[in-house]
Amino acid sequence: MASATGKSFDIALIKRLLKYTRPYRPTFKLTIFLTVILAVLGPIRPILISYTVDHFIIIPKVRELTIFCLILVGLLGVETIIQYYQSYYSGFLGQKVVKDLRQQLYVHISRFKLKYYDRTPIGTLVTRVVNDIETIAEIFSEGLLSILGDLLKLVFVLIAMFAVSWQLSIACLLPVPFLLIATNRFRHGIGKSFKEVRNEVANMNAFTQERITGMHMIQAFNREEIELEKFKEINKKHRNAHIRSVWYYSVFFPIVEILSALSISLMVFWASRDMIVNAFSTATPGMIIEFILFIYMMYRPMRQLADRFNTLQMGVVSSERIFKIIDADESLEDKGTKTANAIKGNIVFDQVDFSYVDNEPVLTEFNLNIREGEKIAVVGATGSGKTTVANLISRMYEVSNGHIYIDGIEIRDFSLSELQKSIGIVLQDVFLFSDSVVNNITLKNDKISYEQVVEASKAVGAHEFIMQLPGGYEYQIGERGTQLSVGQRQLLSFIRAYVYNPKILILDEATSSIDTESEFLIQKATEKITEGRTSIMIAHRLSTIKKADKILVMEKGKIIETGTHAELVDKNGVYKKLFELQFSRDGS
Ligand SMILES: Nc1ncnc2c1ncn2[C@@H]1O[C@H](COP(=O)(O)OP(=O)(O)O)[C@@H](O)[C@H]1O
Ligand SMILES: [Mg+2]
């Protein structure tokens, strides 16, 4: 990261960010205009005060004094109002830009293929979408425009100072080299510790996200203590990084105070001495007050610039990360044009190779032929590749080599949405959103009516159980469906697949044992839902396996046996062993 050292500001990156202000061009221009006006108005007040002191106080003139005081109050009023609008609009602009950027990022990552999510910690992505984007907002509210404002203020104050008296100006500027040194040190130090803070925030998000998701595991295995220790460690690093940044501030600010006091002393000393010893002195008492104000006006932007460059820099780092995600093309290729309306459901795997991780093949030269309407049961040990086969048919993952055809058409030639519409999937882990039962079934597809949902539930045999929930179909399921049993969740996902009426059904049965009642319901539901469609059932239940037209036995990514239950038992091979191991206790 180029900006980590604080050396470079990526102009191209800033330009790219500024592009996002395009829809808000008038606001952007107005904000810049207000920023310039503010900088110009700044030095006018000290000049007026100086004039007032020298001309209406030292030589007392009450009427003029009153008028000038009123003008000063008026000027201050105008400045305040402009300052208000300037801050408001720059903040406004930042939030608008960030809203657009966040939305773009969200839409973008929601198209990413699953492979991307396999290798990116969710917590990190959350940090990108939430925290990093917020830092970019600050580029607008506290970064760019304020830097411009500060620089302009500084320029105008210096011009005014030298115009009034170059001697006094030089006296004021003598301590400035020390300020520059201090500022530079500060900027580096604080930049580094801010970066640490942000890294720790990302770490903490990733950690917390993962542990909370897996909390039942942590508790079940009594890992609370160990996990707490890890959390404490991250928390400590986070605190230390923060404290370091606080330390830099608490050293830097007093240094600036001391240096500005030094400037004032030098200037006052020089001016007074000049007035006393030099008969032709141009210095006046008004000028002393004027320069005291100038000094404050000069130091404030210099002090703030250090801070603002950091804000800018952090914003730049954040935008680098965000743009990296936005530029990453991790979406599934969706160039297919074939519609899937008339799909019958013939599936062919032709010499398919696949690996999740490079050089760790899961399937090699895998072949499979399923005729329309066939009910296939896939069995095999955990990790033998059953779920993978299912993932590939619906293009959740892309084959590395070989082809998958549906009705003779390569699946890549279907448009992705068409393909996915014709394949219903009931996954091993049923994912439920924290929403009502009915919304979890329709997934908010408004083409599916409430009546259809009820009808489907009745067909699948889940209507009774849903009606027993408080609120029935409107029952609010907690996040990830934690209040429902495994069997109940599975039933909901059956209805989900059923209402979409897909031509091909993939059913990844949950391995975990479920109660007899759910077992019975699911058995019935399975029969109902597989009726009249090509069904691939990754089966753990004997009832499912026995009813299948064909059983595929998988081992290490290969099909090693094929046949009906009776045929395979007769064959006395792997299936027979598997069958005896898995189902002997069922007594059937
Ligand atoms: N998302 C993934 N990333 C990396 N490897 C995976 C992923 N999913 C599965 N695998 C690996 O692929 C192999 C097959 O897994 P899978 O198809 O889930 O088996 P099964 O469903 O038969 O239990 C296993 O070795 C597993 O570790
Ligand atoms: Mg599996």
Image (tube, grey):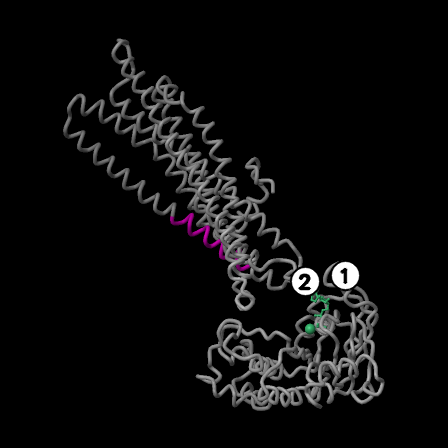
Coordinates of residue 240 in the picture (x, y in percent): 47, 44
Which residue matches tag 2? 115
Viewer-nearest residue: 265 or 33: 265
Residue type, numbered disc 2: Lys
Q: Which image quadrant is residue 33 in?
A: top left
Q: Nearer the viewer, residue 172 or 310?
A: 310
Q: Is residue 112 magenta?
A: no
Q: Earlier in the sequence, mark 1 or mark 2?
A: 2
Disc 1 marks a residue whose amino acid type is Glu
**Disc 1 on helix, strand or loop?**
loop
Give the prevailing secondary structure in the magenta stretch: helix
Q: Is residue 92 above or below residue 193?
A: below
The picture places residue 315, in percent across and down from the top left corner, at 51, 46
Q: Is residue 22 visible to us here?
A: no
Q: Residue at x 83, y 74 (%)?
A: 367
Q: Which residues are magenta?
A: 88-104
Which residue is tagged 1? 360
Q: Is residue 306 above or below residue 319?
A: above
Residue 247, compared with residue 480, is above or below; it is above
Q: Secondary structure at mark 2?
A: helix
Residue 440 on image: x %, y %? 54, 77
Q: Quadrant of residue 387?
A: bottom right
Image coords of residue 161 (percent x, y): 36, 24
10 Å crowding of disc 1: few (<14), some (14-19), many (20+): few
Mark 1 CB within 8 Å of ligand 1: yes
**Quadrant of the rendering where the N terminus is positioned:** top right
Is ligand 1 within 8 Å of the beta carbon of the residue shown at mark 2? Answer: yes
Task: Please identify the quarter of the rendering in which residue 112 is found.
Answer: bottom right
For residue 184, side relative to residue 561 (left or right): left
176 relative to 456 in the view: left or right: left
- Residue 91 in the magenta stretch? The answer is yes
Q: Residues within 10 Å of mark 2 (few under 14, many from 20)?
A: some
